[in-house]
Image (tube, grey):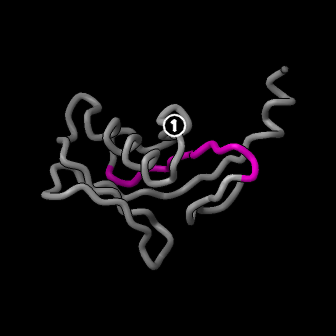
Amino acid sequence: MTLASRDRHIGRTRVQVKVTPRAKRPEVRIGSDGVWVVKVLEPAEDGRANAAVVEAIADHVGVAKRAVHIVQGFAHRMKLVEILRAEGRDRAGCGRDT
């Protein structure tokens, strides 16, 4: 299977994410403006909060961690995150398809 043919079977969704590191409780929710709010316990040090964000989003959407990628905002609270999903799966409220 080539990469081109494999891409036809994968949906790509990008969402804006606002991250709160060192939160009292972990949480994933979608705000009224469509921006995802992700609160993680880990501090924003050595990529620990980013790793926790990827894991939290993957758990929330029901995909593997390897299907969630931070595209922009590695060192910022506002991030652009891409979620890859198998065609036909429920998007669980994900943002726009690209």
Position of 92 with respect to 49 (left or right) is right
Q: Is residue 53 magenta?
A: no
Rate crowding at label 1 as few (under 14), some (14 to 19) or many (20 or more) other CA atoms within 10 Å: some
Residue located 24% across and 28% down the image: 46
Rendered residue at 43%/48% (across/down): 59
Where is residue 27 shown, x and y percent of the image?
29, 60
Magenta segment's dominant SS is strand
Q: Is residue 44 above or below residue 37?
A: above
What amino acid is at disc 1? Answer: Ala
**Magenta region, residue range:** 77-88
**In the figure, is residue 39 to the left or right of 57?**
left
Could you tell me which secondary element the residue under label 1 belongs to?
Answer: loop
Q: Nearer the viewer, residue 72 or 20?
A: 20
The residue labelled by disc 1 is: 64
Vertical arrangement, residue 73 with respect to residue 3, above or below: below
The residue that appears at 27% across and 40% down in the rendered structure is 49
The quarter holding residue 85 reads: top right
**Residue 32 x %, y %:** 45, 79
